[in-house]
Amino acid sequence: MGANQCKPGVCTSDRRMDGKVIIVTGANSGLGLETAKDLVGRGAILVMACRNRESTLQAESIIRSVTPAGEIHIMDLDLGDLDSVHRFARDFLEKFNRLDVLINNAGIFLPPDQRKLTKDGFEMHMGVNYWGHFLLTHLLLDRIKATPNSRIVIVASVLAWMGSINFDNMDVENGWKPKKPSLLYSHSKLANMYHAQALYQKLKGSGVNVYTLCPGFVNTGLMRYTKDEWNSCQMCCLSPIVKMIARTPEKGAQTAINCAVSEDLDEVEFGFFQNCKLSDMKPVATDSLIRDRLWDYTMDRLKLSDDRNKLADTSQGDNLAYTDIE
Ligand SMILES: NC(=O)c1ccc[n+]([C@@H]2O[C@H](COP(=O)([O-])OP(=O)(O)OC[C@H]3O[C@@H](n4cnc5c(N)ncnc54)[C@H](OP(=O)(O)O)[C@@H]3O)[C@@H](O)[C@H]2O)c1
């Protein structure tokens, strides 16, 4: 990340997004809030998909303090609770007849020695960062396909290069190596990248572009749960260093904004982006066997139907999103 970290890249597109419906998960803080601010300023109809009402209302006033444009809708979404994801999707589909851009931004990073599970029993990083977003995307897919020139943007991280997909230890029930500080997070970000590639395989030619990205190292609240682990000496030394080398959320959000709006990408069906530019993924993230196996495993565990032809067929009705849930 070293050299790249110095040149964050800027979204140079001034494209308006008037009337376009855009969901940003985790829009109440950090990168999500900056992304949301920019998109509302372009006239978008923004759906802030967040789990904490109070902090989302505060975020809404921050957005409103900088732009009177666009519309803002706040809708509850806890990605660590599949029932909440179902409720969100149902409410969204009732309320909105289009979905131009889905930005899967929310994410969690826990101390490396903690094994936490979501309400549904998934390891927490995978549960929130991957499983919740996978289900959300699946439930909204027909609406996305029915919207011309739509996009799915999945915020991943180059920490994925340190991850792996462990099919026989998906919820780390058989242990893990807590000495590697970002291991469980890395697995989930790798899964995000495979999710993007699998979606692209299934959506090619359907008018839905799929992008995944790394925003760089950004000074946000992502590490907030790990700060309790630092002693005061570490806090004193590390905090200023983080401030010095990390990007501001505004700079970090540029790549996601670019993926959501840039007219230069209209004909680009898939890509991994860093610093607003197309970039190469490391081999650990491009194994087509793992991509397909992870898709099948996920569909199976979430009890979703795996009719690949149906998925690629844009003529399917909107209600399909719910018919395949047992
Ligand atoms: N910061 C970096 O250096 C960096 C680098 C690479 C990738 N990323 C990725 O960038 C994305 C945004 O992170 P950030 O840096 O902006 O961190 P952040 O400020 O902590 O934002 C994370 C967002 O995710 C939300 N979230 C967490 N758990 C959730 C759940 N169960 N349901 C719904 N929303 C949930 C948080 O909501 P609450 O406020 O309610 O907790 C928050 O809005 C993440 O996907 C992260 O992995 C960040």
Image (cartoon, rainbow, N blue to C red):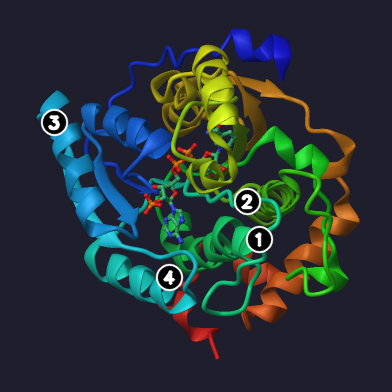
The picture places residue 309, in percent across and down from the top left corner, at 68, 69
Q: Which residue is mark 2?
A: 111
How many residues crowd around disc 4 within 10 Å: few (fewer than 14), some, or many (20 or more)? many
Q: Nearer the viewer, mark 4 or mark 3?
A: 4
How many residues crowd around disc 1 within 10 Å: few (fewer than 14), some, or many (20 or more)? few
How far apart are the alpha carbons under marks 2 and 3? Answer: 39 Å
Q: Nearer the viewer, mark 2 or mark 3?
A: 2
Q: Are marks 4 and 1 in contact (CB under 8 Å)?
A: no
Tag 3: amino acid? Ala
Residue farthest to the bottom? Answer: 326
For residue 107, side relative to residue 198 (left or right):
left
The picture places residue 190, in percent across and down from the top left corner, at 73, 48
Q: Nearer the viewer, mark 4 or mark 2?
A: 2
Looking at the rendering, in which quadrant would you find the C terminus? bottom right
Q: Nearer the viewer, mark 4 or mark 1?
A: 1
How far apart are the alpha carbons under marks 4 and 3? Answer: 28 Å
Q: Earlier in the sequence, mark 3 or mark 1?
A: 3
Q: Which residue is mark 4?
A: 85
Q: Which residue is mark 1?
A: 114
Tag 4: amino acid? Val
The answer to which quarter of the image holds residue 180 is top right
Q: Is residue 134 above or below residue 244?
A: below
Q: Secondary structure at mark 3?
A: loop
The picture places residue 169, in percent across and down from the top left corner, at 83, 70
Q: Which residue is mark 3?
A: 69
Q: Is residue 210 above or below residue 40?
A: below
